[in-house]
Amino acid sequence: MSTEKRPVILLKRPLFAVCGTFFLSSVLFSNTQAYVKSGLASAAITVCIFLYVLKCIGKIRKETVSALAAFLVSAAAALLFSLLLINLPLYRTEKFYNTTVECDAVIENVRGTSSYYGYYTADIRPNGENRSIRVLLSFPDGSCEVGDILHGYVSISALDGSDFGGNRLSLLSDGIFSVGESEDMKYIGRDNSFSVRRFFSKINSKLSSVLITNLHEGGALSCAVLLGNKSYLDNSVRRDFSRLGISHLTAVSGLHLSVICSFAEMLLKRFRIKNSAQKPLMTALILLYMGITGFSVSVMRSGIMNIMRLTADLFGRSSDSETSLTFSACAVLIFNPCSVYDAGLLLSVLSAYACIVYSSFAAKHFSNRIPKILCTVRDGFLMTLLITACTLPVMWERFGSVSVVSPISNLIFIPIMTVFLYISAIYLILCMAGLGSLLTPVSYLLNAVSEAICSAARLGSLFHGINVSLNIRGVGIFIILLSASVIIMPQLTGKAKRTAYVTAMLGALGIAALLATRSIIYSGTGEIVYNNSGKNDGFVFRIGTKYVIADVSDGSYSFLRKLNSAAEENGAAEIDTLIFTHYHMKHISALNSFSGRVMLRHVMLPYPENDKDMSVFDELCRILEKQNIECSFYLRRSGECAELCGMSFGFFDHTEVKRSTHPIISFTAQLGECKITYLGGSFNEGVIDEEELMSSDTAFFGAHSPKYKTPVSCAVGGTSVISKNASAEADFTGCIFGGDTVKLEENGNYTIRRIRLSE
């Protein structure tokens, strides 16, 4: 028998370099202006011409020219591709910014709904225009479905990232370049034209309904891991998995596709299907699965790699995994140019690269003489560490935090989730085959495994400090040093490889040193950040390494996220307590969305004072109970005090004025040696303790309802901070300010730093 190794014919290493350059250039310059991209592309082409001239006169070797030209041409192609398919559509959209247009809108995706509002991805075509533009459409109707055609007037504005549905980059990854708002859209019909995405979306919906109908509790997790449909999955489950650093297990990814492919190949071999027929059948299955899961970028990347492997095997050739990876990443970008903004694609490519590198390293350096179970534990732990090192720049830039228990969590949960995925696939096949007699025992098993997985994730997520914020000045340099060294190390040899190893170690030590330094500095200090946006006010309190948010707003979700961003910039990886000072109907949807995205441990609610407050209070309690978030209550009465996270809050009597249903909001907070008082709109008509105000180090004058109507008369002993709206509404001529007076601009903020905490 011949032992000659099969040649790599399907793909060769030069293609790895070219595709890698194309992908890297697309990612690095994705947010660059059009004129910069065109200038860089022109410069790259000019350098290629110059190199060709040098080669012709014999000043440079032919091989060198070919290598450099390949890199430069692929980089120029990526820039021009991005210019035509991202910058040009964006330019066409910009002309509609800050305008109101009459248009038809076709609903392409339902992003979120409530009883009184809806958020949709929609293609709108303004009257008189030949092209449609994709917007994030919001209007007061939560009953629309995919394919509905609406007509009305839409106000279009630029995407600022604070809109419902995620941050700016996640919306850009869906091809959404603008926001559309409307007060009245009328239903005029259905779009019955054939669409590949809608076709597969209907299949996904039908399969999901089968799982949900038959499995109930376990069906939500099955839909997420098998079909990529997370709409049934509770926010609490997503939050727990995210805390443990295993959120990728609840989204269909390359890992899930690999498990499905292994399962399908096992079945085909069991039925003795010929090898020549297996490959086409597997290719068809992969394409079908890619469609059913919504053509998610990670599944497409893995699917293309698997198809290339199957094609190579069919023709008796071997494929290079690294080249297949870069080629598949470029293919995903060509299929969907906006996926360059998708963090899932970057994480998928880097994770796959780390797995390929580790497999090659383990095959050369590790012995399999130890028991198989120990080999599995070793490989799982080390591979997760390598994946973390490679994906750290994306985690830092996109999410700002990382889970320190991710290696252990993956080691525990991946085998369990793999078994769960196998059982879910078998159950779905039995359902489709109508084998009812076998469904009951399998459904019991699925529900039991699902409950065990969710309970284990919930238990693990209760530990404090498992998520670490990477928002530290200077940490980015060490992260890039570590990740870049680990990524390029397999491509180097000799002295260069040793240098990369030393650089990676320095990067890891630098990150550890910065994290330890911040922990030491923060341990005995606190900080208060006041944030104002229009009529909305809020505070972020840092007590050592714990964070508390106090919300004095109309229930705006975007304002809550703004407060959370302020906490994240200050080093927060999770919020220990969120305090609501009063109630609005919008607080219901805001809390539901906020708790699903932010790691929130505890919420503090005031006891309701009337029936309207009671309805909101009950709904908030229901959300918190469903999401397993601890809740406590306080009474808005003078003398009442609440202690939490090492600080105390004092409250004044609940007071309302006849001209408004909104209560007057005022409170005090004591953080270490610093005492502050917040005074909301018309506070001078409520109950205020003059001694508390005089003894406060800082008094914040806000303008959250009700509106000021009478002149303000008070005496402040410390610094006075006056918001823009309060300054415009109130007459402060009768006030005595004992300290400095700071008047904020629109959307201003004020920070009190380096507060010494009490022993």
Image: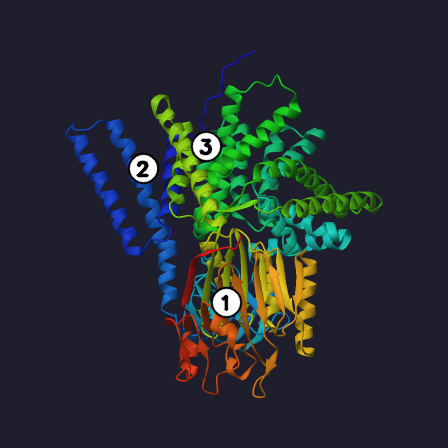
Q: Mark 2–mark 1 contact, CB under 8 Å?
A: no
User: Would residue 311 appear left or right of 635 to someone viewing this image?
Assistant: left
Q: Mark 3–mark 1 contact, CB under 8 Å?
A: no
Are there few (<14), some (14-19), or many (20+) residues within 10 Å of tag 3? many
Q: Which three-letter amino acid code belongs to the residue tagged 2?
A: Phe
User: Disc number at residue 322?
Assistant: 3
Residue annotated with mark 1: 538
> Residue 421: percent from the left, percent from the top?
68, 41
User: Between residues 398 and 664, which one lies in front from this camera angle?
Assistant: 664
**Is any part of residue 111 visible from this angle?**
no
Q: Quadrant of residue 652?
A: bottom right
User: Would residue 83 appear left or right of 441 to someone viewing this image?
Assistant: left
Marks 2 and 3, the one that precedes in the sequence = 2
Residue annotated with mark 2: 71
- Structural distance between the alpha carbons of marks 2 and 1: 51 Å
> Residue 311: percent from the left, percent from the top?
53, 32
> Residue 604: percent from the left, percent from the top?
62, 64
The vertical placement of 692 against 275, above or below, is below
User: Between residues 163 and 193, which one lies in front from this camera angle?
Assistant: 163
Q: Which three-letter amino acid code belongs to the residue tagged 3?
A: Glu
Marks 2 and 1, the one that precedes in the sequence = 2
Q: Quadrant of residue 289?
A: top right
Q: Quadrant of residue 657?
A: bottom right
